[in-house]
């Protein structure tokens, strides 16, 4: 069976693909960016350029998968979110389509990772990096529509369709965060 990583062309996605390949897994790496813009390309992975917000493509990506790590999202940090709210709403399509495709493909496990940007700004002001809880995301800032509604979808989807689900909110963009999230799945 295949493990799918969406957002595989990103920094964390590329490291996650490397880690999964190191575990001997068959990996389908998916990103909307052209391959020459990916942070890492792994010869051992099936690298696919495509758009998870397109339902037909999402189904093709999920076909034959045992696990999906959904890291794909419009991103760019707090400034990006505040200045591109409508564009960021498209991440809702990506997450929803991949959840539906996972259900239809009979995917056993679905992992979702989102940015800490969904947390209210006043929760992110402590320079000592105060630990945040999932409940701290509600009520969230308007800047993280997928993080808020996506969390609700990912909570109800496994209950109805009997799939395990896992999530992670990244506060750092580094290999350590990618490994912690992968180990939590």
Image (spheres, rainbow, N blue to C red):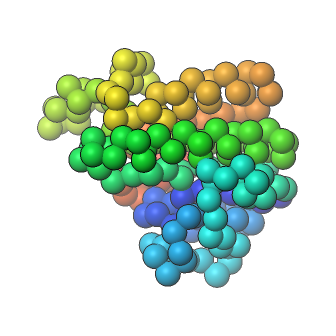
Residue 113 to residue 51: above or below: above
In which quadrant of the rendered image does the N terminus lie? bottom right
| Front in this rendered view, residue 184 or 65 | 65
Q: Residue at x 67, y 22 (%)?
A: 156
**Does any portion of residue 62 appear in the rendered image?**
no
At which x and y percent is residue 129?
Answer: 23, 36
Q: Residue at x 23, y 30 (%)?
A: 121
- Residue furthest to the front: 86
| Front in this rendered view, residue 99 or 26 | 99
Question: Where, by quadrant of the figure, is residue 133 drawn?
Answer: top left
At which x and y percent is residue 153?
Answer: 62, 27
Query: How many marks on residues?
Result: 0
Q: Residue at x 39, y 35 (%)?
A: 144
Residue 108 to residue 157: above or below: below
Residue 118 to residue 13: above or below: above
Question: Where, by quadrant of the figure, is residue 126 drawn?
Answer: top left
Question: Where, by quadrant of the figure, is residue 81 drawn?
Answer: top left
| Front in this rendered view, residue 52 or 113 | 52
At which x and y percent is residue 78?
Answer: 27, 44
Q: Is residue 125 left or right of residue 88?
A: left
**Does any portion of residue 158 appear in the rendered image?**
yes
In which quadrant of the rendered image does the C terminus lie? top right
Q: Is residue 146 left or right of residue 78?
A: right
Q: Residue at x 32, y 27 (%)?
A: 141
At which x and y percent is residue 31?
Answer: 57, 64
């Amino acid at each position: 069976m295949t493990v799918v990583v969406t957002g595989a062309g990103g920094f964390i996605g590329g490291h996650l693909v490397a880690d999964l390949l190191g575990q001997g897994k068959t990996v389908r790496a998916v990103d909307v960016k052209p391959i020459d813009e990916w942070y890492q390309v792994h010869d051992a992975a099936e690298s696919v350029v495509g758009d998870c917000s397109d339902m037909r493509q999402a189904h093709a990506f999920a076909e034959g998968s045992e696990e999906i790590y959904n890291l794909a999202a419009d991103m760019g940090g707090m400034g990006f979110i505040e200045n591109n709210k409508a564009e960021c709403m498209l991440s809702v399509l990506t997450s929803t389509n991949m959840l539906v495709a996972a259900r239809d493909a009979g995917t056993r496990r679905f992992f979702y990772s989102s940015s800490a940007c969904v947390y209210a700004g006043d929760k992110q002001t402590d320079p000592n990096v105060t630990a945040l809880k999932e409940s701290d995301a509600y009520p969230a800032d308007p800047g993280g529509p997928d993080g808020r509604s996506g969390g609700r979808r990912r909570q109800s989807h496994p209950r109805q369709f009997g799939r395990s689900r896992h999530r992670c909110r990244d506060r750092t963009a580094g290999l350590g965060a990618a490994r912690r999230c992968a180990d939590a799945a």
